[in-house]
Structure formats: C-alpha cells, structure tokens
Amino acid sequence: MKSTIPSPCFILDEKKLENNLSLIKNVADQAGVEIILAFKGFAMWSAFPIVRRFINGATASSVHEMMLCNEYMETKSHTYAVAYKNTEIETILKGSSHITFNSLSQLDRFGSMAKNLGVSIGLRVNPEYSDVETDLYNPSSPTSRLGVKSENIKVDLPEYVEGLHFHVLCESNSFALEKTLASFENKFGHLLPHIKWLNLGGGHLMTRKGYDTDHLIKILKDFKAKHNLHLILEPGSAFAWETGILKTTVIDIVENGGVKTAIIDGSFTCHMPDCLEMPYRPKLANGYSDSEKGAFKYRLGGVSCLAGDFLEAYSFDQPLSIGDEIEFLDMIHYTMVKTSTFNGVQHPAIGIQRKDGSFDLIRAFDYSDYKQRLS
C-alpha cells in the first residue's frame, strides 16, 4: 500500500485518531468540562467529520480559523487572537460564541461591540508560571506579550467580562496544570467569583502514554466545584498525538568531510520547522534517532537550499539507497499547520489511512498552489 502513496505525504491514521478522541471525550465526560480542538495544532478539516463524532467545539486564533470552524466544525468558534483588526472584528464576532481579548486596551476597544452582539467575553491573563523550558514556546515570562499580568488589573473587570483564559503549557502533564492553577489562584483568585467560565488553554497532553488522566480529572473536578465555574480546555497536540507520519523518499546521498547525508524529497525547513526551532528530533519508522544504535549512520538533509535544512545523524541497520522510504513518526500535530512552500518546494500530499486498510488521497499539491500564494 505505502509504495503507491505519493511522496512526500502526510498520512493520518483514522483508527489512532479515533482512539485519541475517545480518550479525550472520556476525560471531558468524567470531569464535567468542555474540551475543544485547537486549530493551531490540528486543522486537517478533511478529518473533522471524525472529530465531530466525539467533540463539538473548536478554538480559533484568526479570522480564517474562525471561518474554518464555522464551515467544517459546523459551529461558532471560541476565538482568541493576540490582537484584532478593525476590518475583521465584526466578522470574527459574528462567527464566534466566545471571544477572548489579549489586553485591557483591546477589551476596552471592542468589548462593547462584542456585548451588543451577544458574544461571551473573556480576558487572557498571565499566571506567570509554566513548565515550558524552550523560550520560543514559553508564553508566561514576566515580559510576555501574551495576557495581562495581575499587577495591571487595578480594579475589578467590567461586568460584561464573563471569563478568563490562560495558556502556558506545552505537551505538559497534569501536575504542571496543578501548579499553574495554584499560581493562577494566587494572582487572580479575587476575580473568580465574578466570572462564569475559565479557559485553561492547551498543552494538556492527555493522550501521551503514561499521562495520569485520573489525576487530571480529579484536579478539574475539584477546581470546578471550588469555584463553581465552567471549565474549558483546548489542546492541540493531544488530539493528533502519534496519529500519523510524514512519508519521504531518499533522492540522493552525498558525502563530504566523512559525513554521509541522505537527501529526502521533504524539507525540515518547509515541512517540519519544529525540528529546527524547538529543536524536536522525530523518531523514524525504520531507523534510530540514536546515531550509534544502527550500523550505518546518515545525516538527513532536506531538499531546500537553506544550509541548515538537515538533522544530525540517524542510524540504520542497512545502508540507505536512493528510492528508500524514510517515514517520520508523529508528524500530524503542529506540522501540517506550519508548512511553507519556501524555495518552491512541493507541499506534501495529504491522505488518510482508513480503518479497513484502504488509503484515501485527500489532496495533492502542484505549481498552482505555490504560484497562488504569491503575486
């Protein structure tokens, strides 16, 4: 089957997605909370008919994500953006059930409009705690542009503010959430009697093996009972965690300075930017991220002309040859949503491996997709 799938190609496993969705729904039901999909982590709308069987909400961070939610999740979105433009705010409000403002100035600027349109209004705050160690992905630093610090809320919030929102976790466990809630209560607890809902953001990686979902359910139930609040979680990674691969093919092998590099028809720069930014080192279906485990060692190089478009050596049990497939695992969340066509590199095709073993090619990309992003 895989030999007939185009390369490069993102391949979503339908059964694995359903397994994640079933677990997420179980947590939501047992804890009595609302868990919605964050498009910034997973926006493969061809899979939304599957998602809608388990959950019925999503969060958007832009007017385009809001429109995608309306069209393919078939519901209004919970919307948060760092800032809203005058030219977009009315459209966003009409397509949103909830809107969260990132600053007091934006709340002051657009809050009355949101109230008049019947949208539930929230404010993002910064609890100044996070377990995220990579600065690029840490939104809770004292100088962060994301959310309002407690010292800047001198008086109570306007009466039309119905919720608060924080997002400080990234692929974290329930104990990190517990510590975040403690910091949040310390800084913003005086506001809780005056709101109806609290959005705990994303980063709750409840579908990862070893995650303590019982502990998550307990702290959610306890916090909800203590403050009589509707709780909302909006993970991105948890929905699509370990649900699919990026299939690539070796198209050349070069050797310089004693280092062999297998050039693939994909690109870390264009298709897997977290591998360079995080940096995140993906596992392979057939190969080892430990360069010493296999007998044959190769650096993996992308097809773009960026000098840094490569990952340091992986190892293999057999020597690589042109035409060999390299499958990068866990490439569905926070990967497809970040791709680019830099250098004119072809975007990977997108497909779904169905439960019955068949493969549905959802979309293939060509020159027109590259051209139409430019002018």
Image: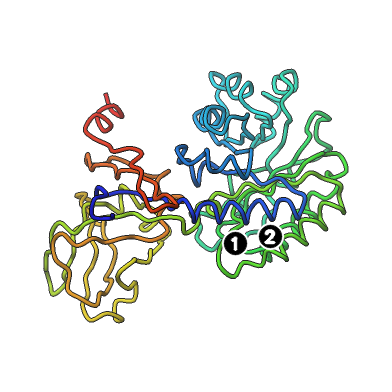
Mark 2, residue position: 177
In the image, is residue 102 above or below residue 139? above
Quadrant (top left/top right/bottom left/bottom right) for the C terminus? top left
Q: Earlier in the sequence, mark 1 or mark 2?
A: 1
Tag 1 secondary structure:
loop
Q: Position of residue 318 (x, y in %)?
A: 20, 75
Q: CA distance from mark 1 to mark 2?
A: 8 Å
Which quadrant of the figure has residue 94? top right
86 lies left or right of 350: right
Quadrant (top left/top right/bottom left/bottom right) for the N terminus? bottom left
Category of crowding for the residue at label 2, using alpha-carbon neighbours closer than 10 angstroms: few (below 14), some (14–19), many (at least 20): many
133 lies left or right of 128: left
- Residue placed at 68% from the left, 60% from the top? 177
For this orientation, the residue located farthest to the front is 356
- Residue placed at 87% from the left, 54% from the top? 226
Which quadrant of the figure has residue 196? top right
Going by the numbered disc 2, the residue's amino acid type is: Leu
In the image, is residue 108 above or below residue 280? above
- Residue placed at 26% from the left, 71% from the top? 313
Q: Position of residue 217 (x, y in %)?
A: 74, 59
Mark 1, residue position: 172
In the image, is residue 204 above or below residue 65? below
User: Looking at the image, how many numbered discs can be counted on the residues?
Assistant: 2
Q: Nearer the viewer, residue 91 or 187?
A: 91
Tag 2 secondary structure:
helix
Cβ–Cβ under 8 Å for marks 1 and 2: yes
Going by the numbered disc 1, the residue's amino acid type is: Ser
341 lies left or right of 334: left
Q: Position of residue 234 (x, y in %)?
A: 62, 46
Q: Nearer the viewer, residue 286 or 128?
A: 286
